[in-house]
Amino acid sequence: MIKIVPPNVKGFEFVDNVKLAGKIYQDCAVMGSVAPVRAYIQCSWFSPEEIEFMEKGLATLAQNPTVSLKYSHHPLSHQYNDIDVNEHPEVMGDREWQQNTYQMDMHAMYGMEMGIGLFMPSKPDVGQTYEQGVLYALHKPNILIIPDDEKDIPLNLMVGCGNTRIITLSEARDFDFHDAMFKPYDGKVF
């Protein structure tokens, strides 16, 4: 379990253990006048590299007092009937599971304050980009977090220009997710 105190942040405490994608994260929350944001946390988990980045991203968000993991929606952790598709891939062929998981994710996008995407430019995922488009259409800010070593990989124009902001994983720990003002992407696109 990761328990790192964010530097220069006063008035926070670790409040809950949160289980996401089979791992326990200790969620910290700001104690004071501003509540942490509730986010729809998109990511891919279809390869070992994506799983590793997801876990690093969730651990980083757990250390950020401006994000509530407990009250956020992480699709892999919120599957219909609590079925883990990595442990039971056969469920992906079940129509009931498909429709209900899709509806749960759609309702979560409507209900969350914003989106946070753990996005790997080297492995773009059409499902995640669909979610980014839905969040954009709902007028919800969406902050993409990319691996530090992938910031020079060109993004699709719609991803690079259709999100509120794109930051690196190392920036995410101290990023104030309340500051969701648009900032143009300065990287390359195709």
Image (spheres, rainbow, N blue to C red):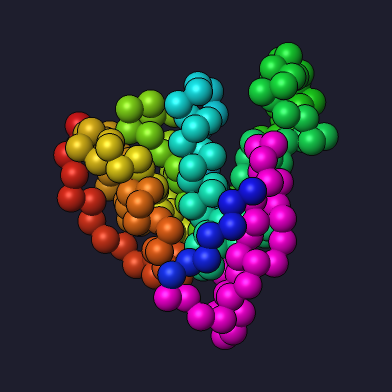
Q: Which residues are magenta?
A: 8-36
Q: Residue at x 71, y 41 (%)?
A: 78
Question: Can residue 128 be seen from the camera position used here?
Answer: no
Establish if 39 lies above or below 48: below
Q: Residue at x 49, y 42 (%)?
A: 56
Residue 120 located within the stretch drawn in magenta: no
User: Residue at the spot x=40%, y=64% of the render?
Assistant: 174
For this view, does 154 lie left or right of residue 56? left
Asked whether residue 79 is in view, the answer is: yes
In the rendered image, the vertical position of residue 47 relative to residue 40, given as above or below: above
**Residue 88 picture location, percent across and down:** 74, 19
Which residue is most to the right? 81
In this rendered view, identify the residue nearer to me: 38 or 17: 17
Magenta segment includes 17? yes
Q: Position of residue 156 (x, y in %)?
A: 28, 34
Image x and y of residue 19, in percent: 71, 46
From the viewer's side, name the closer residue of 160 and 17.
Answer: 17
Q: Is 171 left or right of 99, judged from the image as shown? A: left
| The quarter of the displayed image where residue 91 is located | top right
Please state the horizontal and vertical placement of residue 41, each as a whole percent of the image.
Answer: 54, 48
Total numbered labels: 0
Q: Residue at x 67, y 59 (%)?
A: 71
Q: Is residue 152 toward the left or the right of residue 99 in the image? A: left
Q: Residue furthest bottom?
A: 33
Vertical comparison of 134 with 44: above or below:
below
Q: Quadrant of the C terminus?
A: top left
